[in-house]
Amino acid sequence: MSLLIRGGTVVNADHRVRADVLCTDGVIQAVGPDLEAPAGSEILDAGGQLVMPGGIDPHTHMQLPFMGTVASEDFYTGTAAGFAGGTTMIIDFVIPDPGQRLMDAYRQWRSWAEKSAGDYSFHVAVTWWDETVHADMKTLVEEEGVNSFKHFLAYKGAIMASDEVMYHSFRRALQLGAIVTAHAENGELVFQLQKELLARGMTGPEAHPLSRPPAVEGEAAHRVIQFADVIGVPVYLVHVSTRDALEVIARARRRGGRVFGEVLAGHLLIDDSVYRNADWAFAAAHVMSPPFREKSHQEALWRGLQCGDLQTTATDHCCFCRDQKAMGRSDFTRIPNGTAGIEDRLAVLWTAGVGKGRLTPEEFVAATSTNAAKILGLYPQKGAIAPGSDADLVLIGLDQQPGAGQPLRFGCLTNLRPRFGQSALCVGARVAEAFQAVDVVSPGHRCEVLCADDMPCVFVDAQKERAIPELHTWLELQLGAGEPHVIHGVVPIVKEIAAADEVGTGRRIEAQRHVLVPHARTNIHARPLVLNVVYQLLDWHVGGNGEIRRESRSTSDRTGVIAKNVHRVPLWVAVVANGATPLARVCGRG
């Protein structure tokens, strides 16, 4: 099947150009002006839109067993949420228990990930050491396409890697041509500070950032970089959250060190005031490590991203629901660490980065896709719009400032086929005055979006006069007094549309080596997009009073009235209001 994306502006990390993109069987065949569409091709009009490589989230934790519970987002719902916001591939983490064979843990994670809606790959953590770990690292690199190994300098008594473990693991990674990654927090300092705070009667979420001050991260970043430098292996620091750690990375890079840094969208946008919120559940929902920081660190992180000392953006997507967070009600050290964000990374980074002049569109592509692909051995199969690259594409509508009655356009895929026979092909939209109604017109079919005050919008099949739950949307439009807002449409374009029961075991793709670091290859476990992901997760109910409720088939605590500020979007369009921080609201959902 061929798809011609016509009339858009193609944006890669190094240039942008007005061009058409021809895709066949999930691979880009040609990029250029005025391309001819092969017979039978589908044509997508991308006029007025930017065409970009699909987002790569290099740091997620789907259904992670952690701190006495399991992360609530599995590989199916998590990758589907990624598609909703333009992320077309994730790199998750296999985290063996101390003493567990790496290969045993890897097989377990692979089995969990078979349900993924999109492409995925893995880092593998080294939490202990013996000769079996030495052997398994070789097997993972040479037979499974793993080329990065994670080390936790935090979480004493659980998965924290000792200096001895790091020494042996770093040496082995160097031998195998792999890169090492690190969660940089001094685990001993954190452990002792936690004890001190509890002894002083500080048991709530407000104590969490106090137990992990910026110096804890700065010290660990310095130590792990020195370890890597002595051994000669490239090192990638995950979720850099402080000026302290950033300065260590910058100094190492000025000396010629092969050091890479990742920043989370949340750390760029959310500050530590969330932990002092009077609502315990809201504060606990934001407990993650490293914690959100004082605002001055945010500007330093933005500058690090701008100047190239930080190369990638991620989410550390690791969801825990309200009842799971409540496990630490009387002891903040027992609150499961983790927040969400995969659904919103591209939208908020576009709004807060490009929309506010911090990043160019090219820099946005580099930070959300291309740099991760290069550093982790996926480029140019991923992270580029070029002949031969995977057709993982995102369309982003150009900024428009809404006025009363002004139309707002956002792109929609034209080959979506929901199950149960509905047809809902989107080619455009008009948002009416006060954003109370949206008409979505498609060839041979018309859908309407009905919006109640302060409630989400629900697609309604105009022919059958009933709700289509798997084609719901939330228009998160907070209209501040006198403050202009920008709406961005994000359209993931993927290789194939398939129903859940049609998904196979996926294909294995050998990635290319790249010039930055002499890595081993990385395997991508490629999956077709499952369109009706939201339908599988939630049943939507519209009551007689207009109240819209959602009920989860598997997670009872997700039942309840949807608040106005909860940000979730349809599978192919992400809509975000400028100045909002959807990550905070996603973190707080439960």
Image (spheres, rainbow, N blue to C red):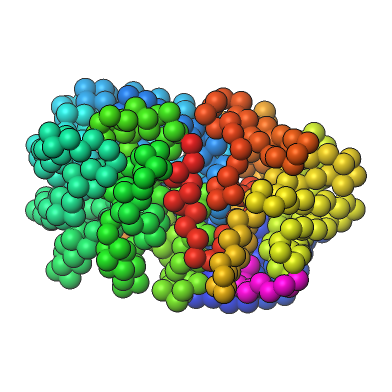
Range covered by the magenta-colored residues: 397-406
Q: Position of residue 283 (x, y in %)?
A: 36, 44
The residue drawn where x is 32% and y is 43% is 288
Residue at 79% across, 48% down: 424
- The one nearer the camera, 374 or 242, is 242
Instruction: Classify residue 319 by image quadrant.
Output: top left
496 sits to left or right of 167? right
Residue closest to the eye, 287 or 410? 287
333 in relation to 556, above or below: below
Q: Nearer the viewer, residue 570 or 391?
A: 570
For image coordinates 32% across by 47% down, the residue present is 275
Q: Residue at x 86, y 56 (%)?
A: 443
The x, y position of residue 464, in whole percent, is: 89, 40
In which quarter of the view is residue 470 placed? top right
The image shows residue 295 at horizontal and vertical percentages of 30, 63
Is 54 a magenta residue?
Answer: no
